[in-house]
């Protein structure tokens, strides 16, 4: 069905990065051997056959000029003059001794190679087959927001880092232990320039990372990515995987510890450069990390206008649940707070970050996760506490006012689009996240053991106008996540810790859980109420904020994901010719979750898809005046419109099977009450409940 389209151009963003940094290191402390011996022939492990350290020669970083002519080679101290493993005609020429010796964390041989190449104007650095294990002694310091954890390698703009193209038999591996509290790390590889004070045209551009194996564990049989099939590397067509779907050996695996959940394989820093050469990532194997690939980031902690101060118009009251059912107008939520946390709402939250009226918060610690054992044995895990959460409007701190966050997006060049392609990504929380635009994500394979855990999503676009638009996702295979594909145009309002404390009565660091990451999820859930309250205010004062603009999701395969695709606050979204099948997902179809969710989205088109085994095939909802101005209006189901004015128009029916629940059988297209502000829309938005249609 087709509706008139609205000529708006919007977009928005979501995930908050966790800060990161380092204490540095020097060349003498480089680890290039495995921390543990390999055990051959374990199930799912090719044994020692892909151990590059068995190859003759030493691991070098070889530098080439723009015409491909060799310039210089670097290796670990003590290997000067030895044959380089990746090219028997080259010997190591710099092991950081003698007149070439350097000091400081960037004197590590592989980093020294990239820095020398950058300074000398040579674009290509090739890392030989081998294993580099990042440790606290060898990680590099990094700028905000990664200043607390640090990074493994730094690839500056103008440098193209390449590993071994014999990735199955002689890989170039960069890994880090998964052991809890052993090492914090924001990324194994960071692609960035010091762009904060540079003109846009001089910010990050013209870089790439390829043919590396990036792994979040040093555990035997997994440390070189052995359990992650390299199916994305050779993918010619998504049709090649139909009937031959990639799978993982039996799990679950224990590698996504709190430290690794915040580590990415590759992070690409924000950049406002819209004229430079692309920044592309390809033929990477990434496994056992929180994030696979991430361009740009969102944060609620930096505001666009330094003088602006958020004044929330809501107050959430967390009351311990003492009755069988929470009172009306409250909702139930299980959480864990620091044992000594006490509710307090600051009397003042100032634009300079200071606050008044509350004592210092009591941060959640590991000890808060346990309770004494009545039998005198080891402490027992502390169960979550259940609260009844009340939400009420308030002007206690003045007239509600909301500040826009500062964007940290990768804008991209519309005439030289960045590419993310032919990567193989396994056992991650998030496979590919683009906070930005003008980037194409294609022919990647992202698989994990099926999970229903919150915020585990395969791919996502979070770049928003007035900054970025236009991302494409084509011929990708995504399996096992809570969400196959996500857009989230909600978190674009500034909200520092003082405002969170006003909203909830508690500071973010007072929330915890079985792991710290779970506690922060509770913070995100509670903050969302304020973001929802901010959206209608922005709609009146700054209507170009809050929508993700022109995102194309075509010819992909989304399998075993709890929800297939979610369009939230999107303008001009295109979801076409995908296969979306929940069979084997962590949550059964009777949960009523959708194959394609369309929420507060306009001018978007869902066509030619095959959608199977969901509660609702396509689910359309909206909250006009709350989460958006219009809700979900002027969209087309089974139809395609190429852009404003529909210069290209076509009809492509979606195909449905095995959708629906016991209460709503055969619910292939569902419209929820109040989905659109325009009461002339068909079907009528005023019908109570959910209207289900077979097509």
Image (tube, rainbow, N blue to C red):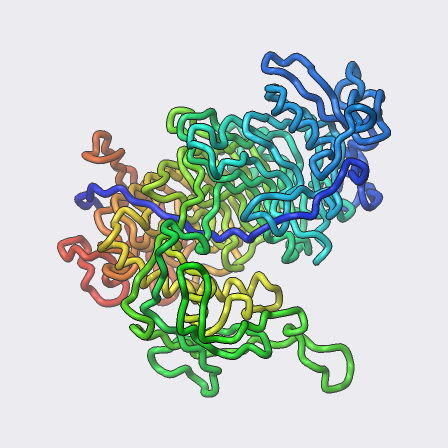
Residue 133: percent from left, percent from top: 74, 41
Image side of residue 666 versus residue 100, left or right = left
Task: Tell me which corner region of the image, top left, top right, bottom left or bottom right, holds residue 676.
Answer: bottom left
The x, y position of residue 87, in whole percent, is: 76, 18
Which picture quadrant has residue 539?
bottom left
**Residue 351 drawn above or below residue 461:** below
From the viewer's perspective, tell me whether residue 128 is left or right of residue 690: right
Instruction: Give the vertical position of 252 relative to 114 (above or below).
Output: below
Numbered marks: total: 0
User: In this picture, is 134 found above or below 537?
Assistant: above
Q: Residue at x 59, y 21 (%)?
A: 123
Q: Residue at x 67, y 47 (%)?
A: 216
Q: Nearer the viewer, residue 298 or 232?
A: 298
Q: Nearer the viewer, residue 10 or 360?
A: 360
Closer to the camera, 396 or 245?
Answer: 396
Percent position of residue 468, x then y: 37, 39
For residue 617, say whether it is visible: no
């Amino acid at each position: 069905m087709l509706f008139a389209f609205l000529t708006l151009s919007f977009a928005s963003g979501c995930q908050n990065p966790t800060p990161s940094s380092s204490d540095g290191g020097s060349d003498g402390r480089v680890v290039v051997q495995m921390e543990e011996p390999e055990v051959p022939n374990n199930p799912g492990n090719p044994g020692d056959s892909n151990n590059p350290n068995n190859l003759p020669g030493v691991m070098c970083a070889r530098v080439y000029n723009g015409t491909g002519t060799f310039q210089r080679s670097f290796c670990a101290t003590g290997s000067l003059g030895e044959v380089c493993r990746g090219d028997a005609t080259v010997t190591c020429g710099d092991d950081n001794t003698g007149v070439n010796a350097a000091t400081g964390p960037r004197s590590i041989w592989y980093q020294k190679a990239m820095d020398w190449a950058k300074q000398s104007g040579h674009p290509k650095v090739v890392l030989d087959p081998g294993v580099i294990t990042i440790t606290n002694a060898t990680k590099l310091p990094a700028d905000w927001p990664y200043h607390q954890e640090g990074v493994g390698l730094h690839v500056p703009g103008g440098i193209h880092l390449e590993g071994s193209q014999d990735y199955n038999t002689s890989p170039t591996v960069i890994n880090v232990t998964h052991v809890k509290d052993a090492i914090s790390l924001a990324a194994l590889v960071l692609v960035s320039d010091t762009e904060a004070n540079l003109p846009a045209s001089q910010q990050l551009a013209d870089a790439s990372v390829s043919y590396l194996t990036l792994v979040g564990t040093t555990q035997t049989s997994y440390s070189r990515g052995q359990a992650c099939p390299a199916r994305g590397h050779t993918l010619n067509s998504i049709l090649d995987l139909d009937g031959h779907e990639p799978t993982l050996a039996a799990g679950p695996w224990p590698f996504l510890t709190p430290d690794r959940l915040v580590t990415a394989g590759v992070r690409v820093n924000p950049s406002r450069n819209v004229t430079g050469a692309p920044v592309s990532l390809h033929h990477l194997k990434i496994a056992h990390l929180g994030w696979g690939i991430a361009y740009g980031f969102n944060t609620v902690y930096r505001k666009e206008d330094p003088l602006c101060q958020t004044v929330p118009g809501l107050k959430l009251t967390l009351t311990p649940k003492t009755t069988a059912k929470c009172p009306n107008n409250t909702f139930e939520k299980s959480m864990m707070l620091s044992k000594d946390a006490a509710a307090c709402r600051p009397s003042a939250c100032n634009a300079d970050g200071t606050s008044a009226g509350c004592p210092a918060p009591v941060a959640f610690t590991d000890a808060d996760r346990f309770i004494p054992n009545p039998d005198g044995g080891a402490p027992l895990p502390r169960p979550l506490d259940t609260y009844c959460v009340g939400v009420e409007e308030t002007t206690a701190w003045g007239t509600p006012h909301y500040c826009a966050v500062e964007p940290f997006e990768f804008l991209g060049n519309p005439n030289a689009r960045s590419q993310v392609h032919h990567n193989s990504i396994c056992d991650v929380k998030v496979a590919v996240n683009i906070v930005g635009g003008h980037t194409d994500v294609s022919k990647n394979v992202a698989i994990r053991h099926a999970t229903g855990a919150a915020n585990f999503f395969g791919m996502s676009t979070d770049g928003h106008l007035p900054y970025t638009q236009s991302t494409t996702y084509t011929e990708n295979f995504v399996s096992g996540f809570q969400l196959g594909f996500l857009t989230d145009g909600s978190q674009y309002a500034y909200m520092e810790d003082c405002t969170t404390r006003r909203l909830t009565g508690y500071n973010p660091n007072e929330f915890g859980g079985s792991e710290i990451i779970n506690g922060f999820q509770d913070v995100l859930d509670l903050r969302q109420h304020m973001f929802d309250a901010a959206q209608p205010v922005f709609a009146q004062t700054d209507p170009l904020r809050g929508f993700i603009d022109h995102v194309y999701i075509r010819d992909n395969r989304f399998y075993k994901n709890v929800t297939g695709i979610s369009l939230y606050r999107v303008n001009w979204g295109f979801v076409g010719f995908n296969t979306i099948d929940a069979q084997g997902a962590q949550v059964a179809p009777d949960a009523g979750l959708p194959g394609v969710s369309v929420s507060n989205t306009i001018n978007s088109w869902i066509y030619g898809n095959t959608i199977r085994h969901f509660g609702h095939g396509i689910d359309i909802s909206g909250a006009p005046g709350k989460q958006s101005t219009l809700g979900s209006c002027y969209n087309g189901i089974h139809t395609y419109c190429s852009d404003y004015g529909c210069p290209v128009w076509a009809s492509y029916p979606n195909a449905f099977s095995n959708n629906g629940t016991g209460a709503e059988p055969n619910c292939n297209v569902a419209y929820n009450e109040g989905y659109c502000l325009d009461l002339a829309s068909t079907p009528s938005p005023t019908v109570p409940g959910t209207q289900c249609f077979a097509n």
